[in-house]
Image (cartoon, rainbow, N blue to C red):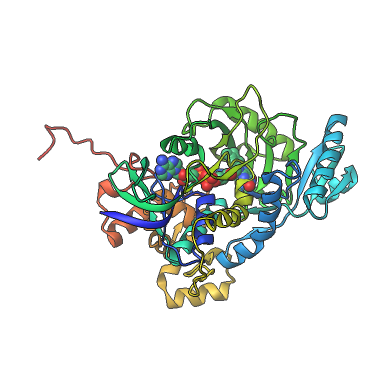
Amino acid sequence: MTTRYDVLIIGGGVVGSAIARELSRFQLKIGVVDKELDVGFGTSCRNSGVIHSGIHYIPGSLRAILSVRGNILMDGVCQDLKIKLQRIGKLTLAVDDEDKVMLALLKHQGEINGVPGLELIDRAKIKQLQPGIHGLSALHSPSSAIISPYSLTIRLCENAVHNGVNIHLGQKVTTITPTADQLWQVETSSGKKYVTKLIINSAGLYSAEICRLVGINEYTVYPCRGEYYVLDKRLHGILGKLVYPAPKKNAPGLGIHATPTVNGKILIGPSAEYLHAPDDYASTSEMIKILRSKAQLFIPDIDETDYIRNFSGIRPKLVPSEIGGNKDFIIEDRKDVKGFINLIGIESPGLTSAPAIAEMVKEMVENHLTLIPDPTFDPVTIGSTLFFSELPAEEKADLISKNPNYGEIICRCEKITKQEILEAINNPLGARTLSSIKYRARATMGRCQGGFCIPRIVKILRDEFDFRPEDYLLHSKNSSLFKSYATESTKV
Ligand SMILES: Cc1cc2nc3c(=O)[nH]c(=O)nc-3n(C[C@H](O)[C@H](O)[C@H](O)COP(=O)(O)OP(=O)(O)OC[C@H]3O[C@@H](n4cnc5c(N)ncnc54)[C@H](O)[C@@H]3O)c2cc1C
């Protein structure tokens, strides 16, 4: 059966999800298709989670305009979607004279871009704002903030679905064909077919592949991996600010930095390493060594037991390693390929810019379709969004007396209750992988990395959702949690 849409968005990362939610304000039939079993499993769940101020981008570029606008919009978005946004501010440090020149340039550039409250500060002020950090001077950008990138992506998409958008997970787009009546037919690897008036290509690392499906051959995406270390909650509160080095000219990223997360951990990273494949999320022993030595610079009191895990994300860069640096985002309403809105090279600050990119894409959609506001649009997240562990004791007791599932701790490290796990499993997107539960409830994210809670989550899925051994997936179709070792001779 073929499903018909006005707009089909390819890619449910933070950008595709923000676009879906923005367009759901209007009377349109919208679909989002993603090759993974949940939204955000590409770059959007694998980054620093920093809402940038806009100091780093050339004035007039899309990265400058959309990051500054995205930073401003983020307060309203987070209020509606009930997500933590902490405006902790950022220190960009100078350790030599070359860095000092860079900071002056960033301040000037930031002011042209409209970044508020920028201040060059001396050693004494650095010490006052963030004890333990050393630098000759620093640029303080108070509008820099932190957010959970997976909460943002998931809630944007869940709110879009609440407002009528259809989500198709586990559907890799493989063919796009123009129809005789000037529509597009989009087909996926599992044979699903969609017919749509407009396509929005928001496929991140794979955007150039989607372009090639409609005959646009001019783009190449160069994957560039960034590895991180996650530090234990024991260090919570040690770092009150984001701490970045002064960026180096033509470097592929902003440099290895220290990022407090909204959940009380600290990230050290990301590195920058060009790859041949867009899906090599390895953590390498060489990089682990480098990250450890950097961590000691940011947090001198760090202990061996504070390193709890590694992960990596991959930047979809439009410049190869031999050129270096960055290119601007490409966001275009193709005139030569009618009905194809193309987003490519949305590397950092794509998370920050997502709500502003969505506004820009909405203007492009208006070139093709009449946008009639939908009076039933509801911008607010429905359902429970509480973190039980953060509630006052009386409120906890009250909840437990009404619902005993709040009285059973499933994830001991993060203090996540059975009720929170049940809500994560019952999500509106129907995503049921272990990673889907992790990104919604934060279970498995603590020190023991699932040693305590995974068996308990497995039991909940078996007892209350009738999971069979083959139903348990870590994140993708090929990531079964259980393997059968029965041989022919042992089978009965
Ligand atoms: C190491 C690192 C650190 C970063 N730090 C920050 C930061 O602190 N702040 C900030 O603002 N930005 C940051 N960024 C950038 C930010 O993460 C990205 O700009 C943003 O996540 C891009 O979102 P997206 O939706 O375009 O891409 P993605 O999240 O990659 O989404 C694309 C989606 O398309 C799907 N897809 C691909 N091909 C197909 C297909 N054929 N069919 C169907 N679906 C398909 C994928 O499964 C994926 O879900 C960082 C990036 C990296 C790598």
Q: Nearer the viewer, residue 46 or 8?
A: 8
**Can residue 42 be seen at all in this image of the molecule?**
no
Q: Residue at x 39, y 49 (%)?
A: 182
- Residue occupying the point 61% across, 60% down: 84
The spot of residue 139 in percent (x, y) is 82, 44
Is residue 448 found left or right of 459 in the rendered image? right
| Residue lying at 80% horizontally and 39% vertically, measured from the top left | 93
- Left or right for 459, reference 437: left
Outermost residue to the left: 492
- Quadrant into which the C terminus falls: top left
Is 224 placed above or below 43 here?
above
Q: Is residue 96 visible?
A: yes
Q: Is residue 97 above or below residue 129?
A: above
How many labels were placed on the picture? 0
| Quarter of the image with the N terminus in it | bottom left
Residue 210 image offset from top left, x and y in percent: 44, 39
Q: Nearer the viewer, residue 282 or 420?
A: 282
Q: Nearer the viewer, residue 92 or 422?
A: 92
Q: Using the image as rendered, state which of residue 341 and residue 349 is in the foreground.
A: 341
Image-based side of 9 in relation to 94, left or right? left
Dividing the picture into quadrants, the one containing residue 96 is top right
Q: Position of residue 158 (x, y in %)?
A: 46, 61
Q: Residue 449: x, y in percent?
A: 48, 45
Up the image or down, 276 lies above or below 149; here it is: above
